[in-house]
Image (cartoon, grey):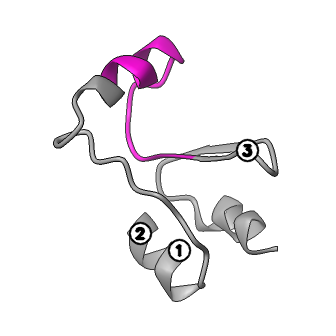
């Protein structure tokens, strides 16, 4: 749902698939995350966990 939202709202993103890149799981766990998806935006210093349309809107601005 997150990928669809980002695509439909023309928000560019880079996907890291934890099934294809299992080393990413260790990185997420080290940062304290216990669920996916985790969306981060360095420019806006924003991290969103899960499908949160209300927060994803901030990425479009």
Q: Name which of mark 2 and mark 3 comes first in the sequence.
A: 2
Q: Is residue 40 left or right of residue 5?
A: right
Please tell me in which quadrant of the rendered image residue 20 appears. top left
**Residue 9 image point, x, y percent:** 59, 84
Quadrant that contains the N terminus: bottom left
Numbered label attached to residue 29: none
Residue drawn at x 51%, y 17% as measured from the top left:
32
Q: Are marks 2 and 1 in contact (CB under 8 Å)?
A: yes
Toward the viewer: 23 or 35?
A: 23
Check disc 3 and report its element: helix, strand or loop. Answer: loop
Foreground: disc 1 or disc 3: 3
Residue drawn at x 64%, y 64% as measured from the top left:
56
**Residue 19 image point, x, y percent:** 17, 41
Magenta stretch in the rendered image: 25-39
Asked if the magenta segment contains residue 59, the reply would be: no
Q: Which residue is mark 2?
A: 3
Q: Which residue is mark 3?
A: 42
Q: Is residue 48 left or right of residue 45?
A: left
Q: Is residue 21 left or right of residue 27?
A: left
Total labels: the figure holds: 3
Please tell me in which quadrant of the rendered image residue 34 appears. top left
Residue drawn at x 38%, y 34% as measured from the top left:
35
Toward the viewer: 12 or 49?
A: 12
Check disc 2 and report its element: helix, strand or loop. Answer: helix
Cα–Cα gap, marks 1 and 3: 16 Å
Residue drawn at x 79%, y 42% as measured from the top left:
45
Q: Name which of mark 1 and mark 3 comes first in the sequence.
A: 1
Q: Which residue is mark 1?
A: 6
Please tell me in which quadrant of the rendered image residue 46 appears. top right
* Residue 58 against residue 60 in the figure, above or below: above
**Residue 43 image point, x, y percent:** 80, 50
């Amino acid at each position: 749902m997150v990928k669809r939202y980002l695509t439909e709202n023309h928000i560019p993103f880079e996907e890291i698939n934890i099934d294809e890149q299992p080393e990413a799981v260790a990185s997420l766990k080290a940062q304290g995350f216990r669920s996916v998806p985790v969306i981060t935006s360095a420019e806006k210093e924003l991290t969103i966990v899960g499908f949160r349309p209300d927060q994803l809107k901030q990425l479009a601005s």
